[in-house]
Amino acid sequence: MPFLHTATEKIYYEVHSPVFTDKTETIVMVHSVITDHTLFDSITAELTQHYSVIQYDLRETGNSASASATGEISFEAHIENLFHLLHTLHIKKCYLVGVGFGGQIAVKFAARYEFLIQGLIILSLPFYSDSTLQKIKRCYNEESKKQIPVDKIFELGKLESLEPTNIQQVIERLKKMAPGVYFRFLKLSITDNLFQELTSISLPVLTLSGQHDLLLSSQYLISKTMFLKNYSHMTIPNAHSLFLVKDKTTLLKEIAVDFIKSNKTHPSSLRNDSMKILKNWESDTAIDIQKDFHAHTPSLKVDFLYSFSVYVNGQLITEGWNKRFAQEILLYLIFHHSISREQLCEALWPDIPLSNAKKNLRVYLSHLKKLLNAEKEEPVLLVNRQLISLNADVSSDGLDLLTDLQWITEQSDPALKFKEAEQRLHQLVPHYLTTIYDDWFLDIRVKIEIILLDLLIWMKEWLCENGKVSKAIFLLIKFIDLVEEKEFIYDEIVDCYIKLDNNEKSEYWLDQKMRYLVE
């Protein structure tokens, strides 16, 4: 059996793939509380026709074991286990599919390590209303916690309507689980608030619920998430989330395949095309309660690549951007979409005491709302006690650059990669991203320059491999001013002239490099 060993844990995992290579999309499955990795056996068999699939047992479940009977069950521990697993298997990018508690882990992992994740598919995401939470707490407070209250679980979730075979499966699963582990999982699940992590994720997210879910209401989930970007929800007809994977295997496989294809075609946003599967499914009872979240959403265009300009619903907003940090706050929101007051204060004014910064922020946000929120229209800036967020379809020349560069670097066809890179670099001119000089914004510029530098060096090497050294020199010289760390470009130019046995030119450019370093 394959195991991932940590200091205190032994985590069981399985890798399923017809061809497990770096070019194969990877899906990682995270199971729910009363199940283990075998929950996904049926859908894994379907998905491995297209993708690599990784299943694993959460700590203290299935074949995974802890060094002690009271091993730590925290989201932090689960997140680090998953990170360690991906690192061990050399997974650079993957999709996460989570069920119930596994969905909570998936959301929190994506919020922490978004660069590793391409998208999330979450079944039965635990979003509890206050009344539901009270029912759960009352139910389990009455128990000694020495025995899992099977009868109360069925009563609370209205599970009596399930098929007899499914009821028996739930009972057997609960009997096999240690009560102490179950209650620790449950306590962690119901004391967690996912909203902030979910709003911080810019990845495509698809949530699924069963029509017969009562404890985890799809209507409540939609009401809490309806303004999130790149987010979509489906309710599967005649189904309960506990058995979606088993009873709707083929449908879920089609939804997952469509979700991934849509994300690859349109990486910057979730198109919700996967609803077509339900609409065209052989059963005419499909329920589409998904909202068109963007039908009445304002448009916000913020250009900042070379100069700062803001358009709301196509109208240019010219005044007020040099006052009360309006420009800085808006740009930060462009990259984060939703943020807490504390996080915003710490990012923009780290040297000011938090209490003072929060008092000032109230004035700044009032000013920004007046700039963005036109009367009698859907507000662009949403502010409540916890979060500050943008309620808009956002576009930007700066975001376009980031998206384009990311897409280009991920291309596997070298000819296509070179063509797209050359075209994008010709559109870029020096002195970009100088709108503001806040540390967080300068960090973004540095990251872009690193991508550009890596791309230029790759282009040079590919041209040289194909006998086009002179063109490589031309491009390096043409684009040298796009990066600050020019000495690396000088080195590449010198290397090209060495390849051409042109000592005079190689010495000249070596001298240019020394002059640059002295300056």
Image (cartoon, rainbow, N blue to C red):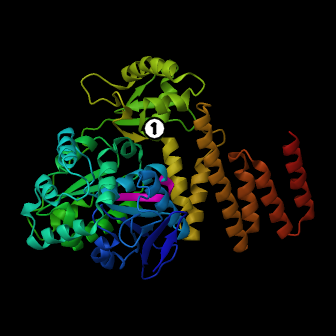
- Residue 95 can be seen in this image: yes
Would residue 239 be found to the left or right of residue 425 on screen?
A: left
Residue at image position (11%, 60%) is: 159
Query: Is 169 situated above or below 309?
Result: below
> In the image shown, does 34 or 457 lie closer to the viewer?
34
Residue at image position (43%, 72%) is: 12
Would residue 97 be found to the left or right of residue 239 on screen?
A: right
Location of mark 1 (residue) = 334
Q: Quick one: SS at disc 1?
A: helix
The quarter of the picture where residue 225 lies is top left
Where is residue 87 drawn, in percent x and y?
54, 65
Quick one: quadrant of the N terminus?
bottom left
Where is residue 354 drawn, in percent x and y?
51, 24
- Kind of residue at disc 1: Ile
Where is residue 79 drawn, in percent x and y?
45, 56
> In the image shown, does 196 or 478 lie closer to the viewer?
196
Query: Is 445 situated above or below 244?
Result: above
Query: Is 392 situated above or below 454?
Result: above
Decide whether the magenta segment is chiefly helix, strand or loop: strand
Where is residue 288 drawn, in percent x and y?
15, 55
Is the residue marked by circle 1 packed among few (<14), some (14-19), or many (20+) residues within 10 Å? many
Start-end of magenta stretch: 114-121
